[in-house]
Amino acid sequence: MPLPALDGKYTQGRRRHKLFRRPRRRALPLSVIVLGLLLLMAWLIPVPQVEPILPIDPQTLPTNTPVPTSTPTPTPTSVYAQFGGRIVFTCTRNDINQICAVNADGSDYTQLTDGLSHSYYPTFAPDMSAIVFARNEGDYFDLFRYQIADGQIQRLTTYIGNAFSPKFSPDGSQIIFLNRVRNTPIAIWVMGPFGEDPRPLYLAERNIVGIAWSPDGRSIAFAMATSQPNAHEIYLLDVHHLDRPPRRLTHAVEGATGSLSWSPDGASLLVCLGPAGDKNLFRFEIATGNAYPLTFGGNNASAAYSPDGQHIVFNSLRNGGQADLFMIRADGRSMRLLLDHPEPDWQPQWGP
């Protein structure tokens, strides 16, 4: 209900009494006349009525006026949310591989893509503005960019081979990825953040199956096939001296996969080792070459560090043979199930 107006319109339409009457022969006392004038002035001056204050309808407020909100009762914060971060991963939904995301505490699960083509290998841009991933378009894999702000998807490569496993440089200026052109071995390629100038960066005689850019941007760790079936060794490539042979880090390790993730301090790598069907996560120290187990059983893969290096996310079959995402502390303790979905969740990557 609107408040009454306080201008002259308020008095319009009222019947006014005459201010003066024909004087009588006998004059009234002066005190009576003064009292009557005071009463008349009080009647003529409008006085606003006091009305109850009604609740404000937010839709009636201007768009630049903040709507007061009640303060919710604080709820306990998960230890996994204190360092924040969003985790993006490959999720199989209705037999189609899609791109999904979830908060580090397991909240706000979201399916980002919803097409008929299979999508894999998601990774965040360093500024969290986009996710780059590989999509199977017909007979080839190409790379695409998903803009987080509006959900728009942009194609980055077009039939340059089979492009997959993209990873941003720490400053976000370049993307490395794996690419296979016709029958040549899978090689490391590089391009700009929007697909500019895709070109080979490192060609090898055998297939490269996994890559990870070091936090300082100087090195690229990669896993390359050996002469033995299903066996790989891990190497370091100096980005500023591509003419030098890559440094070999492992020698005859059992069942190394293409799962690689740098610790934020650049001192170690998360690797996945072990016989087929029984892979475990290890912390591999680059300076010493020592590997320390972090999991025992469960057939684990695709481990990635949290931004502060205190936690690790990975996929595992330990939940009744179902591919699910799990989280542990960096020392291998305090394991928990992050997301329990009846269809597979895998290839997790932690946002910066």
Image (cartoon, grey):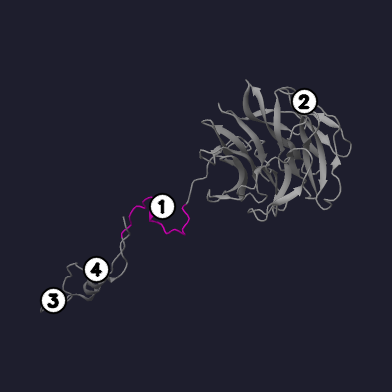
Rendered view: 291 above or below 45: above
**Sequence-wise, which precedes: disc 2 or disc 1?**
1
Secondary structure under badge 4? helix
Looking at this view, is 111 or 79 the one in front? 111
Q: Please state if 232 lies on the left or on the right of 135 as rendered.
A: right
Q: Which residues are magenta?
A: 49-67
Instruction: Tell me the mark number nearer the camera, choosing from 2 and 1.
Output: 2
Cα distance in 3D space between marks 2 and 1: 60 Å
Q: Residue furthest top?
A: 320
Give yes or no for contact between labels 2 and 3 (Cβ–Cβ under 8 Å).
Answer: no
Q: Residue at x 77, y 35 (%)?
A: 270
Image quadrant in which the N terminus is located: bottom left
**Sequence-wise, which precedes: disc 4 or disc 3?**
4
Q: Position of residue 69 (x, y in %)?
A: 48, 48
Q: Position of residue 309 (x, y in %)?
A: 75, 40
Disc 3: which residue: 21
Image quadrant where residue 312 sits: top right
Give yes or no for contact between labels 4 and 3 (Cβ–Cβ under 8 Å).
Answer: no
Name the kind of residue labelled 1 in the image.
Pro
Disc 1: which residue: 58
- The image's mark for residue 11 is 4
Secondary structure under badge 1? helix
Badge 3 crowding class, 10 Å Cα cut-off, few under 14, some 14 to 19, many 20 or more, is few
